[in-house]
Structures are given as structure tokens and as C-alpha cells.
Amino acid sequence: MSKAITSQKQDYSKWYNDIVVEADLADHSAVRGCMVIKPHGYAIWEKMQQTLDKMFKDTGHVNAYFPLLIPKSFFSKEASHVDGFAKECAVVTHYRLKNDGAGNIIVDDNAKLEEELIIRPTSETIIWNTYKGWIQSYRDLPLLINQWANVLRWEMRTRLFLRTAEFLWQEGHTAHATSEEAIKETEQMLDVYADFVENWMAVPVIKGIKSPNERFAGAIETYCIEALMQDGKALQCGTSHFLGQNFAKAFDVKFATKEGNQEFVWATSWGVSTRLMGALIMSHSDDHGLVIPPKLAPTQVVIVPIYKGEEGLKKVSETALQIVSKLKAKGISVKYDDRDSQRPGFKFAEHELKGTPVRIAIGERDLANGTLEVARRDSGVKQTIKVDEVESFVSQLLDDIQKSLYDNAKTRLNASTHKADSYEELKKILDEKGGFVSAHWDGTSETEEKIKEETKATIRCIPLNNKQEEGKCIYTGKISKQRVLFARAY
């Protein structure tokens, strides 16, 4: 069996890494900073992807795919964008290798590219260069496109799922005739993300806008959803950007209006990534391993037989397979774990470690009584129920687990959101309690940067529909009209 999981209290960072590795979610790769997503981890990501993809299509979006490689010259067309990503770009300079005659494979110096190519850190530039040929008139708008892809941002300090050089994500890129339409799209996609994270991942979020320092490179406004992990640190779970006309002007993307005038289009972009896997792990899991919300669990129910000899297995299997059919008919994903190479105790521990929401155990004695044992992964509570109640009971139990995970996370979020009216109070809360700290800020980048340098806390967001109140900046004492949320973050 796998080694024991380090406890959260002992070492939260090691606890997280243990769960990722021991629950078979991902592994380190031969390429520094990159990860291998294992089948169990990828199955969860696929459930996320399938759910989000449907949500995107239900709001009128379609999928397309754009090149991995982007000409370097494209990045120089939008100055703030290139400044934001320049230090993270991987550059392709040659197109051929050769044998040096001594058995070594080396780069062929004669195969230098005329123009270097950038492995995409994000796709705004290549997409907007393409949109120039797709958009001619108001009839071509709005253009609502999403891409599922991988991107590369060179990272020095990496952590599986949370921060890797290469990661999987989706990036939506839309074009609109008016700024009002584009802003509405930006806000709509933020709502889609919040809906998904809260109702599928069972993680409560705070919706807000980023401060200028934290804004996406090239955006007019960045909207975000912020969540709180069990260790009191924040995690950005999704962003939606109103890009204004910056990229349209950089790539000369114009459209003919109904009146026949030529105008630049208005743009948005929005994305979530495999970082959501990190949010799921850190929001719900415990010292026994992974906890998966039922809506995203590849296997929602596992049935483990307890028997002696082949005849005993045959008897148990007959009932177990009937239950499997009944649960599948209700749309519940179920696995009958009848491996004869492992004992029931091993299987219990394995499914607990991997986060299967519900475990059913059926033994020969249970058959005689017409009962079975049902255990829930989140709380560990076990109940004995009648075999003929299993469909309705398990269906309700999965709903209860989903709700319970959200409610527990919401209670933790509320208990970990504090107010600070002085700089000393802010620092004390961050050091002793963690969580979100609501405090006044004078609105300047300089103050934000100084607070970040001194406390390692950033402004996570300015909450949407934020209460307006007179106050004084906790750092400078200057007049402030509203509080913002500070936190240390991943």
C-alpha cells in the first residue's frame, strides 16, 4: 500500500504533494517544471472539461484551435501584453538537429529560423491576427470562440497543478461591436466560472475585479473569482478580461457598421486551467487522502465484496451486479471492485485515498440479512441499509455529500474573512489567522506594492457590488472610499 499522507498541520505543502502523488493524480516529469497527469487525475480534469465545455456552448460559444507557435513579431504589437509575458516565454530558434559525427545530437547552426517563434504563453496575438481575416462587417459579430489547449510559461518554482511551466487550460476569445456587449460577455463568463466552481467543485468564491497591479497584461479590466484554501491562503480560480480595443488596434481588426463606418471591434478573453485541480484538492481533502465532490468524481460509488471462496464471491456478485445495473440506470458512475489480488481492507484504503465519494461493502452475512454497509468518504460515517433501498439512498447521499462539502467550505470562508482597520492589525491577522482581510487602500500601485513587499499579501480583488464606505488607507492614512480583500495566495 502507498505510504502514509503527511498531516496538514505538520506540513501543509508536503501534505498537498503527498496527495497528488499518492492518490495517483500526477507525477513529476523528465522535463523540469512540467508534470505528467496520470489517468485518475486526467479523468477528473475531463469531467471538469466536459462540464465547462457544455456551459460554454450553452452560452453560444464554439470551439476552435490555433497554433502552438507564435511569431515573435506579434508580441511587439501590443506593448503592455509583451511586457507582461516577456520573462516567461520559451523561444524556438532552430528547426533541425544533426549528428556531430561523434554520436552526439546537436542543434544544426545552419537551420536558424528567420524569425524566432514563441511557444504560446496565451493566444491573444495569434488569434487576433487571425480574426483580422474573419471579421469584415457587423454581420460577423459577435465572434464567440473558445480553445482547449496547452500553454507554456517558464516557471522557476513549480508545484504540481498549481504552478507548472506547461499546463492545460481553455481560453475564450471574443469580438464584439460595442464595449457594452464586450463587458456583458466578460461578466457573463465570470458568472459561468463561479457557477462551475461553486456548484460542481463545491468551492465558494468571491467575485471581484483585480487592482491595476494584478490585472492581465493588455486588459482594461480583469474580473476574477477567488477561493480560500484550508490553510488560509487564497487561490485565483478563474479570470475574465475586458480587453477594450487594445488588440483590435494592435492587429487592425475593424468592421463595417450598419451605417457603413469602419470601427475597431471590442474584445474579451477568459480562462481557467488545471490549477482548478489544485483548488479541488486543497478545498476538501484530508489526512486520509483525496476528497472529490460527487459531481466531478470519475467513479462516484465503489462496491467491495467480502467473501470466502469462489462460491461466496458468486453469491455476493449476483447481488452486487444487480446494484451496479440499478445505479447506472440512475446515471450514477459505479465500479464493482472484485479484484481477487487484494483484500477488502486494501481496497477500502485505496478508494479512500483516491477520494471515491461512496463505498458499499457487501458480505455473505449481509446477503442473509438483506442489508449492506454504505460509507461516505467526506465524513467517514457508515450506515447499514436494506438492499432494496440502495438506489434512492445512494442517490440522495451523493447530493448530501456535494452540499456538505460546499457548506463546510463556505463556513470556513466566512470564519476566515476578517476586517482590519490598521496596518498592524492586517499583519497580525495574516500571521496568526490567515484568510481574507478586508481593509481600506488608497488606490495607488505604490502602496499596494509596498504592502506586498512587507507582508507577502496581495490585493486579491475588489469585490463586485462592494459596499462604499469612508475610511483611511491602512498604510498611508489617505482617504479611501471602499475596502478591498488582501490575502497571501498561491
Image (tube, grey):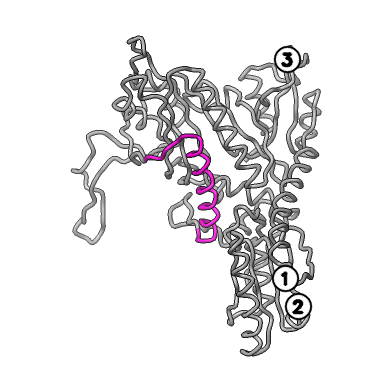
Q: Residues within 10 Å of mark 3 (few under 14, many from 20)?
A: some
The numbered dot on residue 315 is: none
**Quick check: is 152 in the magenta stretch?**
no
Write down the residue under mark 3: 480
Which is more foreground, mark 3 or mark 2? Answer: 2
Segment tinted magenta in the rendering = 38-64
Above or below 12: residue 289: below
Residue 51 belongs to the span the image colors magenta:
yes
Q: Secondary structure at mark 1?
A: helix
Instruction: Give the spatial CA distance, label 1 vs label 2.
Output: 8 Å
**What residue appears at the point 65 percent right and 42 percent down from the top-left corner?**
198
Residue 146 location, x and y as percent?
A: 43, 37
Measuring 69% from the left and 16% from the top, which residue is drawn there? 442
Q: Are marks 1 and 2 in contact (CB under 8 Å)?
A: yes
Q: Quadrant of the C terminus?
A: top right
Q: Which residue is mark 2?
A: 370
Cα–Cα gap, marks 3 and 2:
67 Å
Label whose residue precedes the other's in the sequence (3 or 2): 2
Say whether disc 3 or disc 1 marks the residue closer to the N-terminus: 1
